[in-house]
Amino acid sequence: MGFERGMVVMREARIALSKCKEGNKIYGVRFEKMENGWKYTWAFPVKEATAKREHYDETKIVGQIFPDSGYPGCPYCRTKDFVVCNCGKLNCHNGNDSHFTCNWCGLSGTLGSYDGSGFGSGGDL
Ligand SMILES: [Zn+2]
Ligand SMILES: [Zn+2]
């Protein structure tokens, strides 16, 4: 190797899955690693069978998350907010209710602020 200068810097990118309570549907969210956390830039519908096959839970995204200005939102309900469950998965945050039930594991409780402890993710497409 030895090409230390003039290389293109590739931003680390990952895909995490989120579930929307509208129809209990799954979508993928693309995250890019930034200096101060992970910026989410894109969302796209994913079929349940694909989600299982692609191993979207092999790695973890740890740190604060925030949307890119061009982030389109959930493909189903258009929300740009997530709830990170204790099970390590993302859900749409699309209600005004402070009481939350996870669409993946069924855990329910009162929402607190996300501490950046992480959730599952996989490689970029
Ligand atoms: Zn949604
Ligand atoms: Zn859960």
Image (spheres, rainbow, N blue to C red):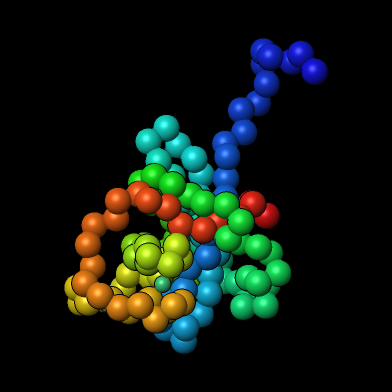
Residue 116: x percent and y percent? 35, 49
Residue 79 at least partly seen? no
Q: Which residue appears at 57% of the width and 36% of the height?
A: 11
Residue 118: x percent and y percent? 42, 52
Q: Left or right of 42: which side holds 81? A: left
Image quarter hosting the C terminus: bottom right
Residue 34: x percent and y percent? 45, 37
Name, please, the residue furthest toward the right. 1
Residue 75: x percent and y percent? 48, 71
Q: Which residue appears at 70% of the width and 69% of the height?
A: 53
Image quarter hosting the N terminus: top right
Q: Quadrant of residue 52?
A: bottom right
Residue 7 at least partly seen? yes
Q: Against 44, is 61 above or below?
A: above
Q: Against 59, is 10 above or below?
A: above
Q: Which residue appears at 21% of the width and 72% of the height?
A: 110
Q: Name the quarter showing ligand 2.
A: bottom left
Q: Against 13, is 52 above or below?
A: below
Q: Quadrant of residue 122?
A: bottom right
Q: Nearer the viewer, residue 107 or 124?
A: 107
